[in-house]
Amino acid sequence: MRIVVIGATGGVGARLLPMLVEAGHEVHGLHRRPEQARELQRAGATPRAGDLMQMRQADFAALVRGADAVVFSAGAGGAGAEQATRIDGDGPGTLAGAMAAEGVSRLVLVSAFPEAGRDRDLGEGFEHYMACKKRADADVAASGLDWVLLRPGTLQDAEGDGRVRAGRAVPYGPVARGHVAAAIVAILDRPRLTREAIELTDGDTPLDAALDALAR
């Protein structure tokens, strides 16, 4: 498949790209800074320049044209309310409109666990971020695309042992970024897994078995 990864240089995306390349896919990765292009090339991906703070539907359309699937794993990463609004809130819905216009249906959106941070007072900025994530989920779910919302728990900078807990509703907990990347690959390999919101944490079940249990 020809797969476009938005968020290709992030903690999940950097793990995802080599997995997709190793699986034989043609991978295109969005980047903002010129030096990131070399990183993507070293991973075996085709660099595609773009700034999510500036991109409009026409820019997304040019990016996804001819693709078989798109992964959106980008996020503002605590950069501020304006960035969260544009990237986490506006980005997925604008992308979905572009995909529909270009006839590209398959979209995997890395979202957020609804219970994230509920046991702490993380301030208005975090509440705004969570509201943006919810808005993006709703926009994608209403888009008519072949979508999957992947909602990881607290991200850990680790590869993981391949064992997870995945479901439509699971207890909140941590999850290795490597598990999130591997889950995206597995979702793309399962076309019957569609129009689902999947919560993901580290757990005791082999990842493939956990996702097979959800596939229709």
Image: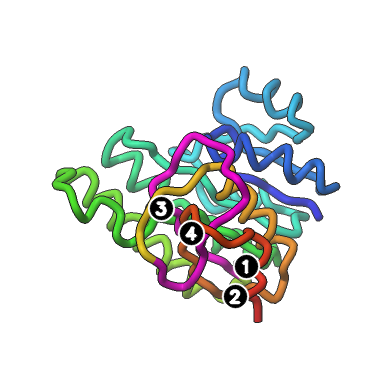
Q: Earlier in the sequence, mark 3 or mark 4?
A: 3
Is 210 placed left or right of 80 in the picture? right
Give the residue type at disc 1. Answer: Leu
Dot 2, crowdedness within 10 Å: few (<14), some or many (≥20)? some
Q: Secondary structure at mark 1?
A: helix
Residue named by callout 3: 153
Q: How far apart in space, not on screen, are marks 2 and 1 (Cα)?
A: 5 Å
What residue sits right under mark 4 in the picture? 200
Question: Given the image, on which type of amino acid does mark 2 rest?
Answer: Leu
Q: Is residue 128 visible?
A: yes
What is the CA distance from the residue labelled 2 to the residue labelled 4? 12 Å
Which residue lies under the disc numbered 1? 211
Please check the rendered image and state whether residue 84 is part of the magenta-colored stretch, yes or no.
Answer: no
Q: Residue at x 68, y 52 (%)?
A: 64
Whether residues under marks 1 and 4 lie with C-beta atoms below 8 angstroms apart, the answer is no
Quadrant hosting residue 134: bottom left
Q: Are marks 2 and 1 in contact (CB under 8 Å)?
A: yes
Q: Are marks 3 and 4 in contact (CB under 8 Å)?
A: yes
Residue plotted at (77% across, 55% down): 66
Identify the mark at residue 214; answer none if there is no mark. 2
For marks 2 and 3, give the CA distance.
Answer: 18 Å
Per the rendered image, the range of residues in magenta is 147-170
